[in-house]
């Protein structure tokens, strides 16, 4: 499948009523595009990470009533699962596409990773562009632009709060023409992951 980007119909998926109906649309409209992105960038991801990266696509299997408000794909070195490991994400809410390096609450050694990042904070601030965003909860459609986000406090919270999370990357609004240009979006995804790769590799040393 040639990747031609995302269209408004993809984002409108999250306005479909009913769990089964929305899941069917996610599987038909969005998940094939996640696979196509992975097929296009997988070799680049392996090089950036320093090891093979496997694709995981959110199944939303625990849901029995409420349809998902977002969906995502994850790239991780572990073939069985990704939630307990540092991983990259490409996903959608109804109003934006996100490209994250993600550390979510299931991750063991959270405090050690946060401590390492805090010790490298000056280098990290020089590495991450000002148009990147920070999210502290992958289950909420809330992300703060880096100039407004306090990176030190975000990492301290990630370190100390049991359910604390840390996600960093790009958020692109659904109406941005970039999303409808497959080649340009692939380039943006690769550039984002390339920028975040040093943080990823640093955290994998824990």
Image (spheres, rainbow, N blue to C red):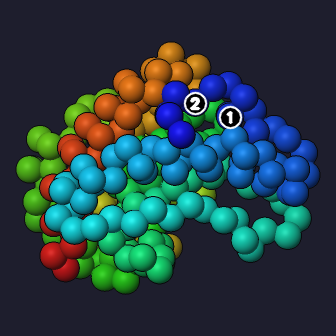
Question: Can see residue 127?
Answer: yes
Seen in the image, is 60 located left or right of residue 137?
A: right
Where disc 1 sits, the SS reads helix
- Whole-percent x and y of residue 193? 28, 47
Residue at x 78%, y 68% (from the top left corner): 63
Seen in the image, is 6 located left or right of residue 149?
A: right
The foreground one among 204 and 44 is 44
Other residues around mark 1 within 10 Å, as few (<14) / some (14–19) / many (≥20): some
Residue at x 33%, y 65% (from the top left corner): 53
Judging by the rendered image, the residue that carries numbered circle 1 is 10
Residue extending farthest to the bottom is: 108
- Whole-percent x and y of residue 155? 30, 61
Judging by the rendered image, the residue that carries numbered circle 2 is 6
Question: Can see residue 103?
Answer: no
Residue extending farthest to the top is: 177
Residue extending farthest to the front is: 1
Residue at x 24%, y 59% (from the top left corner): 46
Quarter of the rendering occupied by the C terminus: bottom left
- Whole-percent x and y of residue 23? 78, 54
The foreground one among 27 and 93 is 27
Examine the image and state in which quarter residue 118 appears: bottom left
- Picture layout, residue 50 above or below residue 7: below
Alpha carbon separation for disc pair 2 and 1 = 6 Å
Examine the image and state in which quarter residue 129 appears: top left
Examine the image and state in which quarter residue 13 appears: top right
- Picture layout, residue 94 above or below residue 196: above
The foreground one among 53 and 87 is 53
- Whole-percent x and y of residue 171? 45, 36
Quarter of the rendering occupied by the N terminus: top right
Residues marked 2 and 1 touching at CB (< 8 Å): yes
Seen in the image, is 101 located left or right of residue 20?
A: left
């Amino acid at each position: 499948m040639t990747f031609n980007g995302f269209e408004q119909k993809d984002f409108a998926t999250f306005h479909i009523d009913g769990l089964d109906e929305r899941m069917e649309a996610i599987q038909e409209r969005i998940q094939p595009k996640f696979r196509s992105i992975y097929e296009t960038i997988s070799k680049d991801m392996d090089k950036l990470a320093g090891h093979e990266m496997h694709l995981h696509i959110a199944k939303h299997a625990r849901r029995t009533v409420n349809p998902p408000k977002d969906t995502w794909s994850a790239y991780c070195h572990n073939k069985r699962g990704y939630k307990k490991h540092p991983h990259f994400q490409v996903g959608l809410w109804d109003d934006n596409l996100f490209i994250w390096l993600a550390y979510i609450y299931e991750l063991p050694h959270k405090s050690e990773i946060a401590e390492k990042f805090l010790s490298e904070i000056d280098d990290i601030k020089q590495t991450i562009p000002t148009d990147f965003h920070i999210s502290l909860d992958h289950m909420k459609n809330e992300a703060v632009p880096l100039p407004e986000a306090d990176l030190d406090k975000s990492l301290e919270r990630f370190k100390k709060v049991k359910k604390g999370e840390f996600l960093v990357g790009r958020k692109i609004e659904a109406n941005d023409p970039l999303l409808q240009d497959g080649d340009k979006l692939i380039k943006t995804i690769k550039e984002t992951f390339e920028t975040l790769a040093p943080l990823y590799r640093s955290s994998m040393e824990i």
